[in-house]
């Protein structure tokens, strides 16, 4: 399979051994030497040699190959999470670059294999992708390319509506419901003869009835609980043809496959960069390559004032953790120490750094990584700041450099990939089989034109009027598409209530 | 390769040949980027699949650097921070492109011939051009960075580099010098005179096309002429000279007399650009509507008698508008046919811009 030159193969063997000796634990990793055109193609396909036919891959390909042709950008490495791992080297790159890529790739492979957020991914995805391609081609033959591709467009428009944590939650088949408890609405009676006065029978009867009704209504609510995996809900409950269900399933499976890569971008790139840097400078490079390496490495790590570089933040955090755990700069005693000088020279010579970073790479994702290990010292040392859009000047400007703001900004962008969280609230909205989506608004509005277009795509699946409750311009609003018209309604102060009686009682 | 099918499919959508509904999501991006700053972006159309997303200007991000609150950080670019990609790891290295390099690329891409400045009187001047690094040379041309780099390499290689005391001492064989060669630089002067119809039928899209075309024409000609001047004329029923900014902003209503622009152009040339010393490039853009056949005949006469004998090449670009296109292109085609001294180009849409540039510049005049 591999087609490396003898020279590259010798280096690969050597680097593989060096990585192993350093404690990295990888699946077998197969490197292939390919042309830039192939790299562009594979990259467009998300690293895979085969994907289902769709114009968006063509678009990616055109972008990658054109920007390479014009000297605007270049892909240096690509590796996919499968067992064995596949990675690509570009023909004609300098030897130093090839070695750098190999060292970096072994870092990724170790991460894929050991980080728990990848534990549920399909390691035979290569086959699955090919299988998906075959199925979709078959549908295209049967129902026409336009029909199928149009449907894929709709699915892709909703592909971010999955529940990224659901693969890690063991769900029992039947949700155990607590037995319906009789609500205690009776007042406490001290003296028996007062009972009928304190809890009049008519009132008691009324309350009982009300409780029953409530319970019944709740039982009829559909879905029982708000559903984050919107795609899954549609697969089971939308009025779709069999082939459409299958296409939607394919899109959803692939979305879940790629999801951990988004959840661990900073860690994964940081980890790979940490290792390529360490292994290159201590074991792999020869003297004449060090300058070119430094040049290349610095280019990758550059962080602009207007952009977040996961490579940079990731590698620095891993190094920071290693150093802190080596010196014992953690725990209560250290946290409570107020003496700046003492903190700076704090060194208990614990040497726990190496173990700690391996542990972190196993259990964390970007959210927990930043949440646990980003420190104020780190932000100051790396000169991080938050920037915001200034409506007056129409420019992005430096806003704050305080630790709390930086951390919450990073966490915000990493939670759900910085995308709005949308749930299905009610699939029988207004008691008319309409769909109500709810956007859990966290301070930032959605982009209105994209929202309306996406809602129209939701309609194409649900085939009944669809609604989304959100906050726009500081006002709770309901947007609705009934198949013909897109309308906007203000919501009452209580916010969106899926209860069909709301409108009658308020109006 | 299957990717080619996907690519063709994408192009078909961009060109509107399939799936009209997706046309509205095509974003052409900034085709030029910042024109003033010399750096440009290559046109890369993109189709955005709509999804639920945050408004781009609503959120901010985290950056790094010596920033004071209120300091401008520039545009975070596509998606900014937080668009955690789903693609596997890729390093993207951005390279800035100068206008010179861009012109090279354009030239290669369209296989444009080198322009041959007209006239033999023009004196070429010898110019020194630094082309690389050599191990020998005069001390005045010592290349410090390369010299120290090779000294550092040598010291590390021989183990004499001490990181604690980073002292780098270049010796004779570390020295590197700038090398140069003498190249002929045509010292000729050139002027481009842009004329544009700004009557009501030329809409925003048409003017954008003219703007992009003129940008590429400038880029190409600048590569060949050191002193390149540009003049701008707008016309409807009457013509006037304007500055560049006005040129691209003005829109008028009313009729069109193309001859008015040609007359003014002729006056400008006669006043400021002696035709034996200057390379002259008039370009005219319109949607092809002219007031009358009589005016068209007048234009043809001016072309024959003044422009074609005196200009390097005369360019006419007909930009199609939603009101259709006029006769003018056909009239000129009929009149001049294969005449080398005039180039005619029909520009149906943005996608045709590159083809049109090739029409204009492909003759190497």
Image (tube, helix red, strand yellow):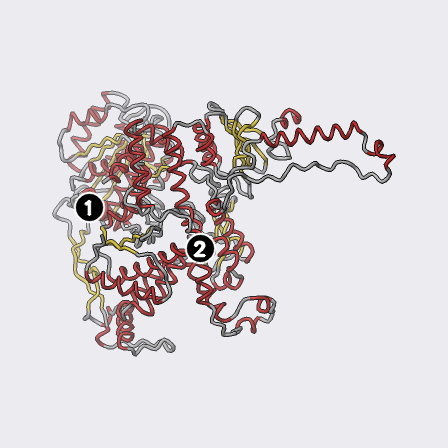
The correct choice, above or below, for A466 with respect to A62 in the image is above
Please name the residue shown 45% across and 29% down the image: A238
Both labels 1 and 2 in a single chain = no
Left or right, A412 with respect to B194, comes to right
Please name the residue shown 66% across and 28% down the image: A213
Label 1 belongs to which residue?
B108
Q: Which of these two is toward me, B359 or B292?
A: B359
Please name the residue shown 21% across and 57% down the image: A4
Q: Residues within 10 Å of mark 1 (few under 14, many from 20)?
A: few
The correct choice, above or below, for A289 with respect to A475 in the image is below
Q: Which residue lies furthest to the left in this view?
A: B120
Q: Residues within 10 Å of mark 2 (few under 14, many from 20)?
A: many
Q: Which of these two is toward me, A172 or A49?
A: A172
The correct choice, above or below, for A18 with respect to A111 in the image is below
> Label for residue A301?
none
Q: Exactly how many numbered labels are in the figure?
A: 2
Which chain letter goes with mark 1? B
Label 2 belongs to which residue?
A305
Task: Give coordinates of residue A265: x percent, y percent.
Answer: 42, 52
Please name the residue shown 49% across and 68% down the image: A325
C-alpha gap between disc 1 and disc 2: 35 Å
- Which quadrant would residue B285 be assigned to in this image? top left
Task: Give coordinates of residue B89: x percent, y percent.
Answer: 35, 52
Q: Which of these two is toward me, B288 or A126?
A: A126
Q: In which quarter of the image is the N terminus of chain B?
A: top left
Q: Quadrant of the C terminus of chain B?
A: top left
Task: Give coordinates of residue A430: x percent, y percent.
Answer: 57, 26
Which chain letter goes with mark 2? A
């Amino acid at each position: 399979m591999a087609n490396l030159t003898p020279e590259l193969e010798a280096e690969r063997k050597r680097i593989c051994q060096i990585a192993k000796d350093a404690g990295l634990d990888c699946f077998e990793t197969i490197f292939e030497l390919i042309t830039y055109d192939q790299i562009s193609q594979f990259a467009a396909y998300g690293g895979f040699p085969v994907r289902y036919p769709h114009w968006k891959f063509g678009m990616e390909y055109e972008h990658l190959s054109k920007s390479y042709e014009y000297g605007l950008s270049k892909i240096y490495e690509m590796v996919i999470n499968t067992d064995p791992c596949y990675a690509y080297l570009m023909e004609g790159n300098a030897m130093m670059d090839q070695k750098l890529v190999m060292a970096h790739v072994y870092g990724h492979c170790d991460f894929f294999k050991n980080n728990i957020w990848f534990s549920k991914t399909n390691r035979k995805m290569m086959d699955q992708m090919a299988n998906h391609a075959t199925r979709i081609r078959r549908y295209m033959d049967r129902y026409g390319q336009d029909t199928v591709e149009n449907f894929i467009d709709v699915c892709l428009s909703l592909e971010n509506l999955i529940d990224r944590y659901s693969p890690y939650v063991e769900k029992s088949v039947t949700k155990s419901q607590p037995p319906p408890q009789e609500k205690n609405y009776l007042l406490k009676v001290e003296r028996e003869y007062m009972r009928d006065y304190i809890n009049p029978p008519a009132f008691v009867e009324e309350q009982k009835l009300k409780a029953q009704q409530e319970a019944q209504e709740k039982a009829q609510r559909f879905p029982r609980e708000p559903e984050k995996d919107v795609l899954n809900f549609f697969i089971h409950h939308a009025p779709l043809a069999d082939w459409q269900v299958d296409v939607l399933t394919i899109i959803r499976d692939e979305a879940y496959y790629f999801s951990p890569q988004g959840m661990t971008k900073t860690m994964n790139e940081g980890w790979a960069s940490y290792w390529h840097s360490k292994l290159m400078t201590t074991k792999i490079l020869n003297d004449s390559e060090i300058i070119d390496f430094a040049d290349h490495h610095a280019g990758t790590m550059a962080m602009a004032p207007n952009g977040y570089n996961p490579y940079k933040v990731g590698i620095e955090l891993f190094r920071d953790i290693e150093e802190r755990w080596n010196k014992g700069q953690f725990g209560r005693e250290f946290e409570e120490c107020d003496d700046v000088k003492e903190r700076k020279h704090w060194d208990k010579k614990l040497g726990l750094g190496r173990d700690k970073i391996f542990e972190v790479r196993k259990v964390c994702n970007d959210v927990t990584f930043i949440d646990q290990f980003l420190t104020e010292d780190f932000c100051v040392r790396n000169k991080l700041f938050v920037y915001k859009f200034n409506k007056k000047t129409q420019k992005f400007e430096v806003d704050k450099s305080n630790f709390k703001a930086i951390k919450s900004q990073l966490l915000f962008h990493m939670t759900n990939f910085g995308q709005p969280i949308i749930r299905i609230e009610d699939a029988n909205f207004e008691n008319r089989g309409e769909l109500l989506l709810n956007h859990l608004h966290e301070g930032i509005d959605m982009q209105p034109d994209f929202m309306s277009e996406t809602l129209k795509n939701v309609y194409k699946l649900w085939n009944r009027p669809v609604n989304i409750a959100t906050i726009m311009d500081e006002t709770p609003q309901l947007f609705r598409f009934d198949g013909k018209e897109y309308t906007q309604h203000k919501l009452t102060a209580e916010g969106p209530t899926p209860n069909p009686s709301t409108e009658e009682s308020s109006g | 390769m299957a990717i080619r099918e996907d690519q063709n499919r994408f192009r078909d959508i961009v060109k509107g040949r399939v799936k009209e509904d997706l046309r509205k999501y095509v974003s052409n991006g900034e085709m030029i980027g910042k024109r003033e700053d010399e750096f440009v972006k290559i046109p890369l159309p993109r189709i955005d699949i709509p999804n639920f997303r945050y408004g781009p200007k609503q959120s901010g991000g985290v950056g790094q650097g010596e920033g004071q609150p209120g300091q401008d950080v520039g545009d975070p670019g596509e998606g900014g921070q937080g668009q955690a990609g789903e693609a596997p790891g890729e390093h993207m290295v951005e390279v800035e492109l100068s206008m010179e390099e861009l012109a090279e690329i354009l030239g290669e891409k369209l296989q444009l011939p080198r322009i041959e400045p007209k006239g033999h009187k023009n004196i070429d001047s010898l110019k020194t051009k630094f082309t690389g690094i050599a191990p020998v040379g005069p001390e005045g041309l010592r290349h410090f960075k390369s010299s120290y780099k090779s000294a550092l390499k040598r010291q590390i290689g021989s183990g004499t580099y001490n990181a604690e005391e980073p002292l780098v001492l270049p010796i004779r064989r570390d020295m590197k010098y700038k090398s140069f060669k003498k190249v002929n630089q045509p010292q000729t002067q050139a002027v481009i005179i842009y004329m544009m119809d700004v009557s009501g039928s030329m809409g925003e899209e048409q003017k954008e096309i003219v703007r992009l075309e003129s940008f590429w024409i400038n880029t190409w000609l600048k590569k060949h002429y050191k002193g390149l001047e540009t003049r701008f004329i707008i016309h409807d029923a009457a013509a006037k000279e304007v500055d560049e900014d006005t040129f691209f902003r003005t829109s008028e209503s009313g009729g069109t007399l193309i001859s008015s622009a040609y007359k003014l152009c002729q006056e400008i040339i006669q006043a400021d650009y002696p035709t034996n010393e200057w390379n002259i490039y008039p370009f005219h853009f319109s949607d092809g509507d002219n007031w009358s056949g009589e005016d068209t005949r007048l234009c043809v006469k001016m072309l024959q008698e003044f422009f074609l004998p005196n200009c390097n090449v005369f360019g006419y670009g007909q930009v199609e508008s939603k009101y259709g296109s006029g006769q003018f292109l056909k009239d000129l085609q009929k009149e001049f046919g294969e005449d080398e001294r005039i180039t005619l180009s029909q520009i149906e849409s943005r996608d045709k811009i590159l083809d049109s540039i090739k029409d204009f510049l492909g003759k190497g005049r």
